[in-house]
Amino acid sequence: MRIWLRQHGYALNAALRHLFKPRSGFWLNVLVVAVALALPFAGLTILENVRPISEQLAVEPEISIFLSMNTPREEATALAPQIRRIVQDAHGTGKLEFVSRESALHALKDKSGLADAVTALGRNPLPDGYVLKLVGFQQAHDATHVDMIAMQLKALPGVEFVQVDSAWVKRLAALLHVLRLALLFLAITLSVVVVTVVFNTIRLQVMSQCEEIEVSRLVGATDAFICRPFYYTGALLGLGAGGIALGVVALMLQPLNSAVVDFARLYASEFRLAPLGMLATGSLLAVSAGLGLIGSLLSVQRHLARLS
Amino acid sequence: MIEFQHVSKQYAKDATALSDVTLSVAKGELVYLSGPSGAGKSTLLKMIAAIERPSGGTVQVNGQDIGKLKASGLPYLRRNLGLILQQQRLLFDRNVLANVMLPLLVSGATRVDAEKRARAALDKVGLLDKAASQPLSLSGGEQQRVTIARAIVNRPQIILADEPTANLDRISAGKVLDALKAFHTVGVTCVISTHDEQILDNASRVIYLKQGRAAANGWNNDTARGTA
């Protein structure tokens, strides 16, 4: 065990010596790999920031029904059974809530920060209305049913305007899903690029050290002893590139955040992009080192066999 | 210690390096291989080190059949051999001491122990003062002695030297041979291939190879010249 550890120490030392060897081209390759990794890392950082927001938003369709201003309160409340029947006819269930124009005004004053403007109007500009939360319409293909319900609701007497509120949330969820798939595809493609770059770097290193490999074999080195420094070099290349890519993404967030914060304020949100957490950062570094190791493993196995 | 039984080596249909060679070298013996260029001396040494495998017959080194030796067993066989090849094969990206330390580090020795033993080996070949030098700054004879230091640093049971004095002047050649003989006197088996007739004049045992065959195998000057 002690000899095994000692030989790993020797291999790590040999790999580190190679990093600082003049004209080894190692750091140039680290930069190439870092550029390849920065793109999926940036995408992942943005998606990870957006994910909690999309998860908080309801994807159940919500329909707001606005009645005309001159609809009497009795007629307005009498619409509830008709609305429920339309939902039942569409084989769905839902939660219906009547929102009086007074409570709507109260909510508007409380939540929007428009209290002064509304008071200045001197009258309540809001109509009576209903909020219908549909259950069992989460799938994308249910959107047609929801639109049909909305059309039937619009045809009811006294209804002025019908708005399907959660359609955009569904679209956002669908968009995020597509983005996640695109990111996965991009990550797989760029992983192949990373493995190829490491493969080629290690190939050149094996070729430049073929004399040392042959001499080592003649004096009794095992294949494991010969291969280990190359494995460490590949893993260090991946690790270094991963670290640089994460650093670049963290730096990139600063200028991006100034624009994002301004945009979010328009929606009274404090949203800002944050770097990835410790666990995610550690995982990405491990993945980077792993890709480097895979590249070096493939390269060493192939080229060492040729030298034999 | 070393046994060849009807050994042949064929690289291609019309390229036979060794043909039906049978010989044995006992433990602690100093044996010279002589013969013209292309006689098969280098091939014979490479077979002992398992660099080449026999096409026919059996080669046994320390009881191990080289023909049946698995790749995973090669490193452990070679750790008991001291190899000195025609080209010095030193690593020019590191100093003399680091070159001599290599076989020890390969075997799992600590850096401190490896350095101590490498310095002792360099002292034996008279090059301790060159430990920190770069191999390229040394003369041909000195480089060859560094190779010898590297070959003996692991205290091998067998030393195989292929033309160790080729391209060296008389004084350098003498120093190299003296170093090799010194190891023979402490019980190390040495097999040395050479063209040098002056060396063969004083040889104890000579195996003369001609066209891949052991044409003579004996203890006198006639054997050395292949006229026995």
Image: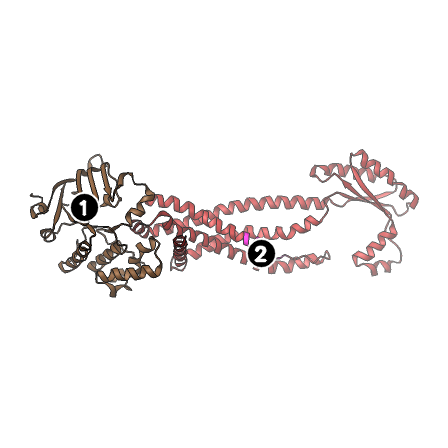
Chain colours: A red, B brown
Q: Which stretch appears magenta?
A: A273-283
Q: Is residue A166 magenta?
A: no
Q: Locate residue B173: give its quadrant.
A: bottom left
**Foreground of the two, A304 or B128:** B128
In the rendered image, residue B190, in percent from the top left (x then y), is placed at 19, 50
Query: Regarding mark 2 in the picture, which secondary structure is present there?
Result: helix
Residue at image point 15% right, 45% down: B37
Q: Is residue B215 visible?
A: yes
Q: Which residue is mark 1?
A: B26
Query: Regarding mark 1 in the picture, which secondary structure is present there?
Result: loop
Parent chain of label 2 = A
Q: Which residue is mark 2?
A: A278
Image check: A108 left or right of B130?
right
Q: Is residue B16 visible?
A: no
Quarter in which the N terminus of chain B is drawn: top left
In the rendered image, residue A256, in percent from the top left (x then y), is placed at 61, 58
In the rendered image, residue B185, in percent from the top left (x then y), is placed at 17, 55
How many residues crowd mark 2 within 10 Å: few (<14), some (14–19), many (20+)?
Answer: few
In the rendered image, residue B29, in percent from the top left (x then y), is placed at 17, 49
Quarter in which the C terminus of chain B is drawn: top left
User: Does A171 appear above or below A45?
Assistant: above
User: Does A23 appear above or below A72?
Assistant: below
Q: CA distance from mark 1 to mark 2?
A: 66 Å
**Foreground of the two, B208 or A178:** B208
For this orientation, the residue located farthest to the bottom is B129
Parent chain of label 1 = B
Q: Identify residue type, mark 1.
A: Ala
